[in-house]
Image (cartoon, rainbow, N blue to C red):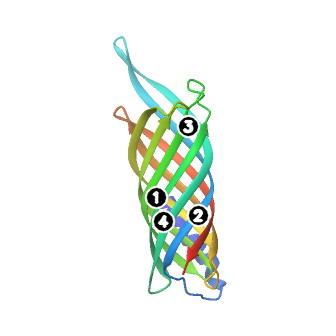
């Protein structure tokens, strides 16, 4: 989280030379692509010893999101948001598995001209579903993220890059989840 805040402050500093424009209130939708990595070390009892078993996988797919932007003084906005994705994975043990990631969060943004940087806290959910439609797992955790983007105050279209990091519990074990999303959006102002 500290690294994300440092990156946000650096990006704000870089953007200070731009002419100031006002962000606008409004509902937004976005669509894009996502890529995620899960890494875990599960503790397994082996005889009288405890050993760690490492597991990881990647997934990528399409992402759909929505938010509502509320403008505050000093070019700050608060954006409650929901993002969902449907992804294929490299899990070799379950080749017909589809990953679904959901993020429900609250994002704060600082604007310099038409550019913004922000941080957010969120609840993250991961579900695995087989091609037959059977949900095999569904787990939840908390995490944070960072976003950078461009949304002109005199237009409705936007583009943003979002990075996320969360811990999701599987069988009482913390699993580290990281993801990135690149989205194109439209805001009704």
Please identify the quarter of the rendering in which residue 152 is found. Answer: bottom right
Badge 4 or badge 2: first in the primary sequence: 2
Q: Which residue is painted at 57% across and 60% down in the image?
A: 162
Please identify the quarter of the rendering in which residue 89 is found. Answer: top right
Badge 1 or badge 3: first in the primary sequence: 1
Eye-nearest disc, 3 or 4: 3
What residue did someone put label 2 on? Answer: 30
The C terminus - image quarter: bottom right
Eye-nearest disc, 1 or 2: 2
Badge 4 or badge 1: first in the primary sequence: 1
What residue did someone put label 4 on? Answer: 119
Badge 1 or badge 2: first in the primary sequence: 1
Mark 4–mark 2 distance (CA, rounded to whole Å): 18 Å
Residue 69 in the image: state x and y as whole percent. 47, 75
| Secondary element at image label 1 | loop
Mark 3–mark 2 distance (CA, rounded to whole Å): 21 Å
What residue did someone put label 3 on? Answer: 98
| Secondary element at image label 3 | strand
């Amino acid at each position: 989280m500290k690294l994300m805040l440092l990156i946000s402050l650096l990006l704000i500093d870089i953007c200070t030379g731009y002419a100031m424009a006002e962000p606008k209130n409004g509902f937004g939708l976005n669509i894009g692509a996502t890529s995620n990595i899960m890494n875990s070390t599960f503790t397994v009892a082996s005889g009288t010893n405890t050993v760690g078993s490492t597991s990881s996988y990647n997934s990528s797919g399409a992402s759909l999101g929505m938010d509502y932007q509320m403008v505050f003084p000093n070019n700050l906005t608060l954006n409650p948001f929901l993002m969902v994705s449907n992804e294929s994975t490299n899990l070799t043990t379950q080749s017909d598995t589809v990953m679904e990631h959901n993020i429900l969060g609250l994002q704060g943004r600082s604007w310099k001209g038409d550019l913004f940087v922000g941080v957010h806290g969120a609840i993250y959910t991961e579900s695995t579903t087989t091609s037959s439609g059977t949900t095999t797992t569904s787990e939840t955790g908390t995490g944070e993220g960072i976003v950078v983007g461009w949304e002109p105050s005199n237009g409705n279209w936007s583009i943003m890059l979002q990075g996320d990091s969360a811990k999701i519990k599987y069988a009482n074990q913390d699993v580290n989840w990281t993801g990135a999303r690149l989205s194109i959006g439209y805001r009704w102002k």
